Image: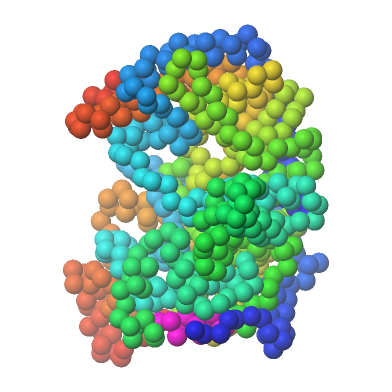
Amino acid sequence: MRSSLARHPAGRSRGDTLLARLRGDAGSRPAVDPGLAGGLRDWLEDELSEAVAGLPDGTGPVRVTKDALDQVLVCEAHFLSERRQPRQVTTEMARGTLVDLLFRQWVTTGAMGDAWEDAVCALRVGRDDGVLGFVEQLAPDARARLAAEVEEHAARIAECWPILAPSWMARTQERLDVPLAGGRIRLAGVVDLAIGAPSAGQASVCIVEVKSGRRRLEHRGDVHLYALLETLRSGAPPFRVATFYTADGEIDVEPVGRDVLLGALHRVVAGTTKLCRMAAGAEPDRTPNPLCGWCPGLADCVPGRRQVEDSTHTGPVTRP
Amino acid sequence: MMVRLPRATAVTEELLAAGPAVGAEALSQVRDRLVAAVSPVVADLPAGERLVLDGFRFSTALRHPERCVEGSTPFVPSPATCRRAVGLAAVDRCLRRRGTSPAEAVAEVLRCGAEDAAGAERDAAPRPPWWARWYGGLPAGARAAVAAEATTWATQLWTALDWEALPRPVVVGARDDWWEPPRSRLTVRTRAEVRVRTSDGQALVVVKSGVPDGTSRSELAFVALGASLCSGAAGAPARVVGLWPAAGAVRVVAVSARVLHGAADEVVSASATWVDAHLERADGRSRPEQALSSTGT
């Protein structure tokens, strides 16, 4: 039995620093422009009207998630290949799910016991997306390795995160599901943590995404997407977005200005247009890129294989 | 601690706005017409059986009639299935004790529920909420998941309305409305998360998951019908406001006699779908198209 995790004095200063970065200076938070959300929604619907018009009648809504955007913007053929793959739980996915549960527990209760046991117990009463079965079928040594990893991530959470005051109104795993074009498009996401009391006058919510893996370029796009969704959903933009890395305890914090929201909007328009094309049955564009070597559709993709062959001459690529 | 989303003021104004009044006579006509239409439909049920048409069954019959033929799965308590019950109790505490946040209120509700469940095992009183015994037996990690889910749900409701602007009394999480027509084997069961008194009688708030769609207005009208049929002297609610927190969407149904008649027609149709499905399962025959088309769904 491992020892319980509780916030200790050494963690206080680190936690307070993190909180200060998330909270920022209350006086500098932007005022909510009451027309902003409606304007962004109109803009999105105008830009996507042509793509939506191309959807065949009777097709279900096109779901736009962070993963779908990441994949389709890299390569349409890659997106389709990933989607056709049966979902397979990996050790990294299991770790991510377990760490998310522990983060949620810490934020909600301010305490963790045996990290592995707590996370698996939470998994047992939650939605079953295959992770529980994966974890339970692990060989004892693989399970012990994963448990040790999870324990390290949990320790980092307890070390870095202070117990949030109730007035921060922490919401965990909050679903965002914004319909556009009469519901034919749905922008969807699940925010790991939203803090800050919603306010009519001043942007006051901070959105935090938790990552148990290594830093990747797409992570900024993910939180920018959530900033846009939160704006469309609630009528007020968050004032900050952040990505917390449980592997090293680092946190990237960014203010949300119009540039962030517009950047996210353009990315959503570009990606959703492609997703609508795919939903309409169009032949996918193939865009050779450094990730072709990891694409499940590589065997059937001539430009992709050429890309991989070329890259073997120029040296190996490390997946970011 | 009164905090609210930017749209909360507008939503609250919509909730309290005047609605088309439904007089006692009009309501009586809705009731009589519904009884006359639905009684023969549920009379086809095997002896001793009863159809309880709740929000879930009503929606299933309208959206996915083919699923009515599938057997129901047993209810399993989970953080998702008990978040509403815990969250409503928490919002009620927030309303009665100024300065209490949803997170604190949820923690209190869960603690009291677990204590009541333990006490009930010892001396059979007081009666704990339905989720309490299950919750009391959970390990710490699972309890945290319950608290987290309920806190998020309660915070969404707590920030969706301008509670200070609501005239008292405000009832959060009242008992469901159960209506049983005389000499009929149907029970209509509806529920609303919040009930407020207005100058026109009462108004209801309903919290939904996902996003609203073409059936959502029918679902809100169904809630209005259930409340109306059970209302007695209070009469029909003036308005039903539906909130979809994930989508930030709001739909308002101003309750008129026409709305109630429409909802009553859909109750008859949904009842027929369920009765047909029940008979089909009992027969063990596969005739889904026949059965469903005969109900007009």
Q: Which of the two residues, A104 or A233, is positioned nearer the viewer here?
A: A104
- Please identify the residue farthest to the front as the structure is shown: B123
Q: Is residue A155 magenta?
A: yes
Tell me: A270 left or right of A304: right
- Give the answer, above or below, for where A81 lies relative to B22: below
- Give the answer, above or below, for where B60 lies relative to A105: above
- Give the answer, above or below, for where B234 lies relative to B129: above
Give x and y (percent) for residue B165.
Answer: 79, 39
* Residue at the image point whose x is 60% and y is 81% from the top: A5
Residue A275 visible somewhere in the drawing: yes
Residue A40 visible somewhere in the drawing: no
Q: Is residue B264 magenta?
A: no
* Residue at the image point whose x is 43% and y is 59% from the top: A127
Q: Quarter of the image holding residue B166?
A: top right
* Residue at the image point whose x is 51% and y is 63% from the top: B138
Colour setting: rainbow
* Residue at the image point whose x is 60% and y is 23% from the top: B230
Quarter occupied by the C terminus of chain A:
bottom left
Give x and y (percent) for residue B79.
Answer: 51, 56
Magenta stretch, overall SS = helix
From which residue to which does the magenta span run? Answer: A146-156
Tell me: B24 left or right of A298: right
Tell me: B253 left or right of B72: right
Give x and y (percent) for residue A183.
Answer: 46, 42
